[in-house]
Amino acid sequence: MTVYLARKGFHYSPITIHKYMNTEMGLYAIVRPKKPEYLHGKPHKVFENKLAQNFTVLQGESRY
């Protein structure tokens, strides 16, 4: 709005324009609501090792 008025020949400070937009014209910025923060849910059920698989690594930092 400041640039628009300056192009039309009216030179006012941005604060003055902001005040008039809020009080006289009733214009306000549309603020998007924040996304809700991450909520930790319940941990999934850990099943027992029925296949008796060995998940130990023989060598550290190994590639498959």
Image (cartoon, helix red, strand yellow):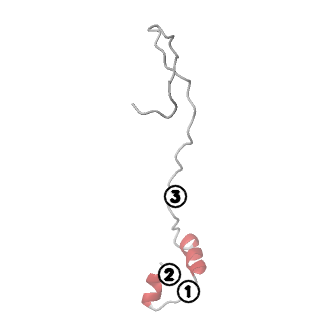
Q: Are the residues tagged 2 and 1 within 8 Å (C-beta)? A: yes
Q: Classify 17 as above or below 62.
A: below
Residue denoted by label 2: 2
- Please state the horizontal and vertical placement of residue 17, each as a whole percent of the image: 55, 79
Residue 4: x and y in percent read: 44, 82
From the top left corner, tell me how far across and down residue 35 is, in percent. Answer: 52, 46
* Amino acid marked by disc 2: Thr
Which of 11 and 51 lies nearest the eye of the viewer?
51
Q: Where is residue 58? Give x, y as percent.
A: 50, 24
Question: Element type at marker 2?
Answer: helix
Which residue is at the front of the view, 37 or 10? 37
> How far apart are the two marked residues, 3 and 1, measured between alpha carbons?
25 Å
Q: Secondary structure at mark 1?
A: loop
Structural crowding at the residue carrying mark 1, measured as other residues with C-alpha within 10 Å and reported as few (<14), some (14–19) or many (≥20) = few
- Residue lying at 52% horizontally and 17% vertically, measured from the top left: 45
Q: Where is mark 1, residue-wise?
A: 12
Q: What residue is drawn where x is 51% and y is 21%?
A: 56
**Residue holding disc 3:** 31
